[in-house]
Image: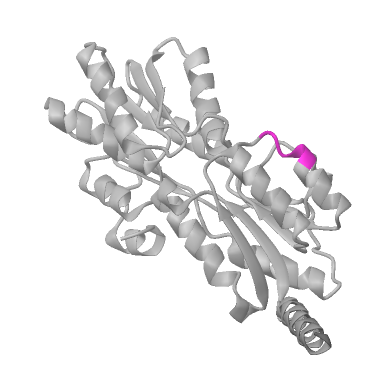
């Protein structure tokens, strides 16, 4: 009996030793990344790949990842990462709101937070830096191009992205302002591509507008996938579009397929939203690990972004190779 007890105790010690050793083998800077799912869009696929390219064991990171399209799932993942003892928390939020308590918990636990891609509606004291796109500037740039057309009437079919996301808010606000302040700008119909920015949902919105015989000459879709869905609805209905058509099509994100449409004149506008923030955040983390200040005059670091339009600023194949996302 004593021998059995001794062997059982030895086995338990060995198991405990294996668990401890396993924990001790977790080398690298502990980082938790809360992002959206790559299936959300071509932009998101490129963004997730960029984060994976930089934040990995080869570069000295011990990474926990959660790719979820809903706010609740993201909040739960962030809380779990904090509980697991990450040193850095990187967040691209499905919704701009609802993050205050989680970020306060991170601060209390000594976790340093970086925002990427999208801003959150939180106090700046709750994060180290935000490496983001200026979504509202993207909207202002698109609206300015629309103004340059000098159309007698702007009858707009507006397809929004995920309601409450920074991209949706930023790309919507300048359009709403233009509609409110210009008598010849009219919102014909507004719908959303849903949480997944669905091309199929966008197609159904346009189909419904066509079935209702609504008069529109601009489709302002808040990402490329939804703009393509809208185009398919026009094709099925025999409506003309693009440079030589009756309906102007506008999208955002700079997928290669979208830039090709602009080059061919099938679409009229595509606004850039750069998905590449990982290298910048990596540099910031390395500074902090070395005990150096980030040296930022402003915690918000804005991606430098542009647009292409036809007519106007038509992309070349070289532009597509340089800027385009995906295949």
Q: Which residue occupies the foreground of this view, 317 or 117?
A: 117
326 lies above or below 233 = below
Q: Could you tell whether 62 is left or right of 67 in the image?
A: right
**Residue 108 at what x, y percent from top left?**
88, 51
**Residue 127 at what x, y percent from top left?**
78, 50
* Way the structure is coloured: one colour
Q: Quadrant of residue 177?
A: top right
Q: Residue at x 32, y 16 (%)?
A: 152
Q: Main secondary structure of the magenta part?
A: loop
12 lies above or below 226 = below
Q: Which residue occupies the foreground of this view, 232 or 33?
A: 33
Q: Which residue occupies the foreground of this view, 243 or 229?
A: 229
**Residue 21 at what x, y percent from top left?**
74, 82
185 lies above or below 34 = above
Q: Residue at x 20, y 25 (%)?
A: 246
Q: Which residues are magenta?
A: 97-101
Question: Residue placed farthest to the front in the image?
Answer: 1
Q: Which residue occupies the foreground of this view, 21 or 86?
A: 21
Q: Could you tell whether 295 is left or right of 327 in the image?
A: right
**Residue 189 at what x, y percent from top left?**
37, 16
Quarter of the figure with the C terminus: bottom left
Residue 241 in view (yes/no): no
Q: Residue at x 24, y 11 (%)?
A: 212
Q: Quadrant of residue 287?
A: bottom right
Is 293 contained in the magenta span? no
Q: Could you tell whether 146 is left or right of 138 in the image?
A: left
Q: Residue at x 28, y 36 (%)?
A: 229
Question: Residue placed farthest to the bottom in the image?
Answer: 3
Is 99 contained in the magenta span? yes
318 lies above or below 170 = below
Residue 243 in view (yes/no): yes
């Amino acid at each position: 009996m004593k021998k059995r007890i001794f062997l059982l105790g030895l086995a338990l010690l060995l198991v405990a030793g294996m668990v401890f050793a396993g924990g001790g083998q977790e080398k690298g800077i502990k980082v938790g990344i809360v992002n959206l799912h790559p299936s959300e869009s071509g932009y998101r696929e490129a963004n997730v790949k960029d984060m994976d390219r930089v934040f990995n064991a080869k570069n000295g990171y011990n990474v926990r990842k959660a790719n979820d399209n809903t706010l609740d799932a993201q909040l739960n993942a962030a809380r779990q990462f904090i509980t697991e003892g990450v040193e850095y928390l990187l967040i691209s939020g499905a919704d701009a709101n609802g993050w205050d308590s989680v970020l306060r918990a991170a601060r209390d636990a000594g976790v340093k937070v970086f925002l990427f891609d999208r801003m959150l509606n939180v106090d700046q004291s709750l994060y180290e830096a935000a490496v983001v796109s200026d979504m509202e500037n993207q909207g202002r740039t698109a609206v300015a191009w629309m103004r340059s057309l000098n159309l007698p009437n702007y009858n707009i079919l507006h397809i929004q992205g995920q309601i409450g996301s920074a991209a949706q808010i930023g790309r919507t606000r300048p359009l709403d302002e233009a509609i409110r302040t210009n008598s010849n700008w009219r919102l014909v119909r507004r719908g959303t591509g849903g949480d997944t920015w669905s091309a199929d949902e966008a197609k159904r919105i346009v189909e419904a507008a066509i079935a209702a015989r609504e008069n529109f000459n601009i489709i302002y879709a808040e990402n490329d996938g939804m703009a393509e869905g809208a185009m398919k609805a026009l094709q099925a209905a025999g409506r003309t579009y693009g440079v030589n058509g009756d309906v102007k099509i506008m999208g955002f994100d700079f997928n290669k397929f979208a830039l090709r449409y602009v080059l061919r004149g099938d679409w009229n506008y595509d606004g850039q939203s750069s998905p590449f923030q990982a290298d910048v955040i990596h540099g910031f983390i390395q500074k902090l690990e070395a005990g150096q200040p980030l040296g930022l005059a402003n915690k918000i670091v804005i991606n430098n972004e542009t647009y292409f339009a036809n007519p106007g600023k038509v992309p070349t194949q070289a532009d597509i190779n340089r800027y385009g996302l995906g295949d």
